[in-house]
Image (cartoon, rainbow, N blue to C red):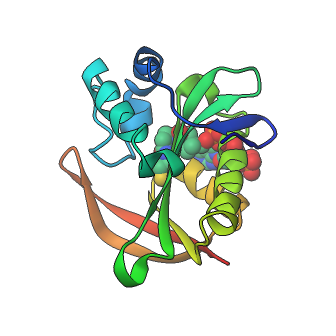
Amino acid sequence: MRIECGPCVLRPWEAGEAVAIVRLADDWNVARYLRDRFPHPYTLADAEKFLAKALSGEEREVRFAIETAGGELAGGIGLIPGTDIERLNAEIGYWLGEPYWGRGLAPAAVRAMTEYGFDKMGLARIFAVTMVENTASMRVLEKCGYVAEGRMRRSAIKRGVVHDQMLYARVR
Ligand SMILES: CC(C)(COP(=O)(O)OP(=O)(O)OC[C@H]1O[C@@H](n2cnc3c(N)ncnc32)[C@H](O)[C@@H]1OP(=O)(O)O)[C@@H](O)C(=O)NCCC(=O)NCCS
C-alpha cells in the first residue's frame, strides 16, 4: 500500500533499511519530545527490533515510512488503535529526521494518515499527545484539523523532567 500525499509518500517499511533509520533517528532533537520507547541513543539493534515488529502482520497496516517525493526515507508515522470499547479510537504518532524538517512533510503525512484511519480503518476518533514545548507538532496537528481537548498537567517525565502535555483529537 502506497499513500501519495503531495510532498511525500507513505509506504510500508522495508527489511534492510535499519541503517537508514538509525541515520535519522539517532538524534536527540528528534527524540526529545517522544516516548522513551523511541530510544536515545538509537542503535542498529533498536532499528532492527522496530522493523521486525513493523513488518509483522497487523502492524504492516498501521505503521508506514514517510518517503520524500524524491524517494528518500524521511521518517515514520503510525496509528495505534485502542482495544475493547476504545477500538474505534487510535493514537497517531510521527517523526521526521532533522534534514527533512521545515518542508511541510509532517502536515501532508498527518493529513493522509488521518484520512486513511477514517476511510480505510473505519476509525471514529484519532488523537495525539504532544509535550507543550513541542510547538511545531502542535501546529502540525492544528493545520490538520485536530482540536485541542485539554492540557494534561504534569503527565509525562522525560530525562527526569516532568512535562505538561496537550491532548489533540480529530473526529469523523
Ligand atoms: C514535529 C515535526 C513532525 C514537524 O514536522 P515538519 O514537517 O518540520 O513541520 P513543518 O515544517 O510543516 O512545520 C509545521 C508548522 O510548525 C511551525 N513550526 C516549526 N517549528 C516551530 C517552532 N520551533 N516554533 C513555532 N512554530 C514552529 C512551522 O512554521 C509550521 O507552521 P506554518 O505552516 O504555519 O508556518 C518534526 O519537527 C519532528 O519530527 N520532530 C521530532 C519528533 C516529534 O516531535 N514528533 C511529534 C511527536 S508529538
* Closer-to-camera residue (22/57): 57
Quick one: 21 or 98, which is closer to the camera?
Answer: 21
Q: Residue at x 39, y 84 (%)?
A: 85
Ligand 1 shows up in which quadrant of the image? Answer: top right
- The quarter of the rendered structure image containing the N terminus is top right
Figure check: 44 above or below 125: above
Q: Looking at this view, name the residue that lies furthest to the right.
A: 6
In the picture, the quarter occupied by the C terminus is bottom right
**Farthest residue, direction left:** 160
- Residue 94 sits above or below residue 170 on the image: above
> x%, y% of residue 133?
45, 53
Quarter of the image holding residue 48? top left
Residue sitting farthest toward the front: 57
Identity of the residue furthest to the bottom in this view: 85
Query: Of residues 28 and 133, which is closer to you in this image?
Result: 28
Q: Please report the residue visible at 44 percent of the width from the left and 17 percent of the height from the top.
A: 16
Horizontal placement of 123 versus 161: left or right?
A: right
Q: How many marks?
A: 0
Q: Position of residue 47 (x, y in %)?
A: 34, 27
Q: Quadrant of residue 64?
A: top right
Q: Is residue 62 above or below residue 71?
A: below
Picture quadrant of residue 141: bottom right
Residue at the spot 38% in from the left edge and 37% down from the top edge: 31
Taking 22 as reference, is 88 above or below it? below
Residue 135, given in percent of the width and then of the height, sits at 55, 52
Residue 100 falls left or right of residue 43: right
